[in-house]
Image (cartoon, helix red, strand yellow):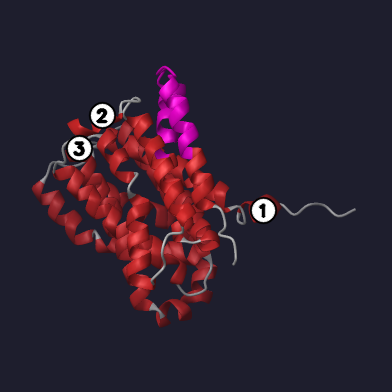
Amino acid sequence: MSSASPRAPFAWLSNQPYVLLSLTSLFWAGNAIVGRSAAGHIPPVTMAFIRWTGAFLILLPFAWPHLKRDWPAIRRHLPLMLALSLAGIGAFNTLQYAALERTTALNVLLLQSAMPLFVAIWSLALFGTRLTMAQSLGIAVSMTGVLVILLNGNLLALTDIALNTGDLLFIAALVIFGFYSVMSPRRPAMDQLSFLAFTFAVGALSLTPLMIWEAMARPPMEVNSGTFASLAYIMLFPSILSYLCYNRGVQLIGANRSAPFFHLVPVFGSAMAIVFLGERMHLFHLVGYALVLCGIAVAARKPKVA
């Protein structure tokens, strides 16, 4: 009788795009909460630099054999690999942490719901790929669900929200990550660990000059158990695990079908608040959850072949 391979569960998971993208949103929901709580205690560039350096060092022992094998492919496609590293690792997360110092977590979550639109714009501009009718409808429905959750069921509260400097920084971050989302499936064929190790390393290196400037211009990071716990979380979950899940999910179903899963971030965030912070469940939560899930189901399904 043959025994199941210990890698079998991971092999199964690596071919489940909806599960992978849902896990990505779960980990990124925690990143928004941790990033906001750490704002003011850890300077944003320092946080991003430590995050990616630590994630790279954790990943390196596992990635090294793959990196050696895949290095010729990386070298042949170096401009694209550098662009992906600078956009998806260096710029996006640094701008996100800088934004969280200047705006509220609510505004960030509201703006993040627009990510599918930026992905769609890049897909159209670079490759002429248009959203299908189902994708457009699904994104609209799931975005409505996000607004219901974040605005406590009162969509008219949108008129009271004004953009500030932090919001503009986060919009810039979303534009950059939209580019990363569309271009990452065009990377050369290589192991996921090779791709992550290279992009993490280049992303961290690109932040070095900014971190030196920040260290001279701002008070240093507070060193305590809270900052260590925050950094440990963001190194592992929103970095290594989420990027493994996200990149594989996009590889399986494409950027446009993957983008609506960003709308699960506030769903998980509000659910965490209910479970861990004792917030009360209300009817608008259930309505919002239902709209988000229905919208994602519509937007992420495979288009019918004519």
The alpha-carbon separation of the residues under discs 1 and 2 comes to 44 Å
Q: Nearer the viewer, mark 1 or mark 2?
A: 2
* Residue 58 visible in the snapshot: no
- Quadrant of the drawing holding the C terminus: bottom right
The correct choice, above or below, for 64 with respect to 286 in the image is below
Residue 12's disc number: 1
Q: Which region of the structure is painted magenta?
A: 265-292
Direction from residue 297 to residue 9 in the image, left or right? right
* Residue 162 visible in the snapshot: yes
Q: Who's the residue at 43% across and 76% down the image?
A: 74
Going by the numbered disc 2, the residue's amino acid type is: Leu
- First in sequence: mark 3 vs mark 2: 3
- Asked if marks 3 and 2 touch (Cβ < 8 Å), the reply is no
- The answer to which of 182 and 132 lies nearer the viewer is 132
Q: Position of residue 148 (x, y in %)?
A: 37, 31
Label 1 environment density (alpha carbons within 10 Å; few <14, some 14–19, many ≥20): few
Q: Is residue 172 magenta?
A: no
- The answer to which of 198 and 136 lies nearer the viewer is 136
